[in-house]
Structure formats: C-alpha cells, structure tokens
Image (cartoon, rainbow, N blue to C red):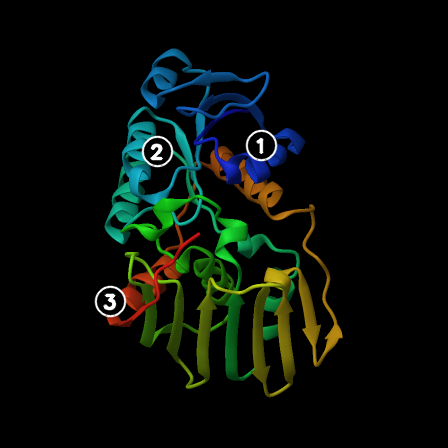
Amino acid sequence: MKIALVGIGKIALDQHVPAIAASPDWELAATVSRSGRVDGVEAFTDLETLLETRPDIRTISLCLPPVPRFAYAMAAIKAGRHLMLEKPPGATLAECHALTEAARAAGTALYATWHSRQADMVAAAKAWLADKHLSRLIVTWKEDVCRWHPGQAWIWEPGGLGVFDPGINALSIVTEILPEAIHVAEATLEVPENCQTPIAARIRFAHASGAEVSAVFDWRQEGDQTWEIEAVTDQGTLTLKDGGAVMLIDGTASGQAAPLAGEYPRLYQQMARLVEQGGIDMDLRPMTLVADAFTLGRRITTEAFIE
C-alpha cells in the first residue's frame, strides 16, 4: 500500500522512513515538508497539493509537532485518507475527539500511535501483571533534552508538552500494562523561567485498588539515561528497563520479546491491519493523564533553560 509521510524531521528520518522501507505492507510514495525530503521519493511542500494530485496514495502518516497537526489531519480525513498520527495524537483532547468523529463519519482508519507500547517486553509485562495484586508502581523517566531534542524550540511553547513529550511514552506503557485504571491525584511541575512547558515533573496517581503509583520525569539527566518502571506485587517485583526493552522479575531477566523487531515496524504493521479493517485505534488515556497533570499541577519556576 502506498503511504505519504508528512513532516520530514528527525523522528521521520530516524524511525518512520526505515520502518516503511523494511515493511512488506508499505511503499513510501511521497513526502510533504517545507525543507526535508527523502532521496528517490516524490516531494511536496504542502499537503493540499498531494491530496489533489495523488489520489492513489490512500494513507497519510503525520510526523508534525502537535500544534499544527490538527489541520493537516482533518484535511486528510476529509479527503478520505487513512491516517496515522505520531504521538501525542494532537495538541488537545478536544482535537483528538474531533478527529475520531470525523474518521468514523468518513469510514477511514485512524491510529493514534504510542511507540513505547511496542517496546519488546511491554506485552510480556502486561501478561505477567494481569493476575497480580499491585502494591506499588514507580516510574522514573530521566533523559537529556539536549541529546534527544536538539534545537526543537516548539517543545517549550504551549502545546509542546515539555518533559511530558517523553513522559507520555512512560504513561502509554503504564496504561497498557496495568489491569486497573489510574488517574492523577496531584502533580508538581518545574517550569524554566523562559519557557511555557515543564522541564521536570512529579506525579502521584490514584489507583483503583489503592496501590501507590507515582512518576518522576526530568529532562536534565546527564550521563546514563533512565527509562524505568518498577511494579511491586504480591508475587514479586517486575522492572521494565530501557524504555520497555528489558524485563526483570525479582532482578532476573524474564519474558519473551514481542514478534517483529522494533517499535516503529510494529506500528506500521498495526496500521496495515487497521487500513484493511477500516478500524480506529485512538486510545487517549496517556494524553488524558498529561492533561490532568497540567490541570492539577502546582507550578514551580526554575532557572532558565539555555541549550
């Protein structure tokens, strides 16, 4: 199936392009970007022209930042195209609900992707936790913003999410693996004095069965990066490390990796299934938790961020 990639930045070139190239389901038939391009692929500078001149391309994958994404997404759906959204699926929950209704009315497939859910050991962790009683879960997600988001000023502006840009990856895993729901009880957000979004956050969640659930996100981590989820249960402690790539039970490696190598290849495999079925997969639980953290969060001004 032919697919067009909109927004040719770092994530598109690092992840989407290789995943499409390796997929038996997809052919990268066009790109849309004001500056970026992929060698050997027809390039457009605006989506409207692509939609008008390439009716043979039935699927669009959007890799734009969240704030401008809605207009592109709605244009694609109104043109009858299937749509795949890089995370988060929009700048607001209202936008995401509007896209869901539009896709349902148009009969097109719609996929809000959460790439971290496709990490090797997430499915195994979900299966292990299914029949356990959880007493405590701690998320520690600390990385260096300068290493992973160089020169991306939009992340510090309204809609850019700040540290929740990676933090939402952790929350996408947590909402996938826990058999019971959580919601935000309280949060503290550290916001640099020259930014609109937080550089660090601490959250306490309420759990349906009373487990202690918390998360700490920080974009100021130097040296080794930390992407870890620890779940303490009545039958042992599960630890997901390296963003879900490694699973330990009581300190010992355990579990079987998900089939098909790589997070983004699995996303594109799922998108192929949705297109074939005309399905919609718009799980907004991770985004709801982030929105609630912004609503309930106590803001603390911290030193200016200078890249």
Q: Residues within 10 Å of mark 3 (few under 14, many from 20)?
A: few
Give percent across and percent down for residue 63: 44, 37
**Amino acid carrying mark 3 in the image:** Thr
x and y percent of residue 132 in the render?
A: 58, 81
Disc 2 to disc 3, C-alpha distance? 34 Å
**Mark 1 = which residue?**
17
Residue at image location 31% in from the left, 68% down from the top: 293
| Badge 2 or badge 1: first in the primary sequence | 1
Q: Give the answer, above or below, for where 125 lies relative to 114.
A: below
Q: Nearer the viewer, residue 284 or 229?
A: 229
The residue under label 3 is 295
Q: Is residue 261 left or right of residue 208?
A: right
Q: Is residue 130 visible to us here? A: no
66 in relation to 189, above or below:
above
Q: Residue at x 52, y 36 (%)?
A: 12
**Helix, strand, or loop for circle 1?**
helix
Q: Amino acid at mark 2?
A: Gly
Q: Residue at x 38, y 19 (%)?
A: 45
In this view, 153 is above or below 30: below
Residue 199 location, quadrant: bottom left
Checking the image for residue 53, the label placed there is none
Task: Judge whether 306 appears above or below 213 on screen.
Answer: above
Pointer 2: what residue? Answer: 107
